Amino acid sequence: KSDPDYDRMILQQDSSRPQGFMVWAGISSYGKTSLRFVKPVVKINSDYYINNNLKPFLSRDVPRLFSNKKKNKLIFHHDSAPSHVSKKNNRLFECIKN
């Protein structure tokens, strides 16, 4: 800011940027999933995670990316976020596995 040409060096300054955003995505050697953006101020609980991320992934992305033979090799990785390790989430994966 001490440079005399400082005001001319600023091309664009926007102090109204959002604080951040959250997105869910997946990748594999067969391709990438659709991006799923989380709306601001949404609390991601098990119901939200299952209905807005997992079910669309299983109904749209898995059939597009994995043939029936490849589905047997599908590995789904979660971190330890509460919505990822909930009982509801685990029950969903147990149903899929069987």
Image (cartoon, helix red, strand yellow):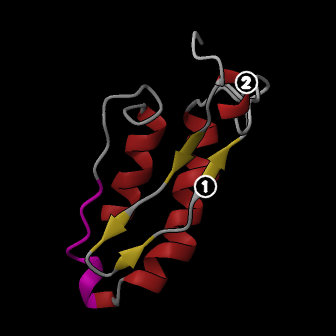
Q: Determine crowd level at label 1: few under 14, some 14-19, many 20+ residues with C-alpha closer than 10 A.
A: some
Secondary structure at numbered mark 2 = helix
Residue 46 in the image: state x and y as whole percent. Answer: 55, 35
Residue at figure coordinates x 30%, y 63% from the top left: 97
Question: Is 30 or 45 nearer to us in this picture?
Answer: 30
Residue at figure coordinates x 35%, y 83% from the top left: 66
Q: Assess whether mark 2 and mark 1 are in contact (beta carbons under 8 angstroms).
A: no
Placement of the N terminus among the 4 image quadrants: top right
Which mark identifies residue 36?
A: 1
Left of 49 or right of it: where is 18?
right
Left of 67 or right of it: where is 25?
right
Secondary structure at numbered mark 1 = strand
Question: Is 51 or 16 nearer to us in this picture?
Answer: 16
Residue 44 in the image: state x and y as whole percent. Answer: 60, 31
Residue 69 in the image: state x and y as whole percent. Answer: 25, 89
Question: Is 66 or 25 nearer to us in this picture?
Answer: 25
Which of the 4 image quarters holds residue 15?
A: top right
Amino acid on which disc 2 is placed: Asp
Which mark identifies residue 7?
A: 2
**Residue 35 on the magenta segment:** no
Amino acid on which disc 1 is placed: Arg
Relative height, residue 40 to residue 15 (above, below): below
**Residue 73 on the magenta segment:** yes
Give, as a single range, the part of the protein colored magenta. Answer: 69-76
Relative height, residue 37 to residue 64 (above, below): above
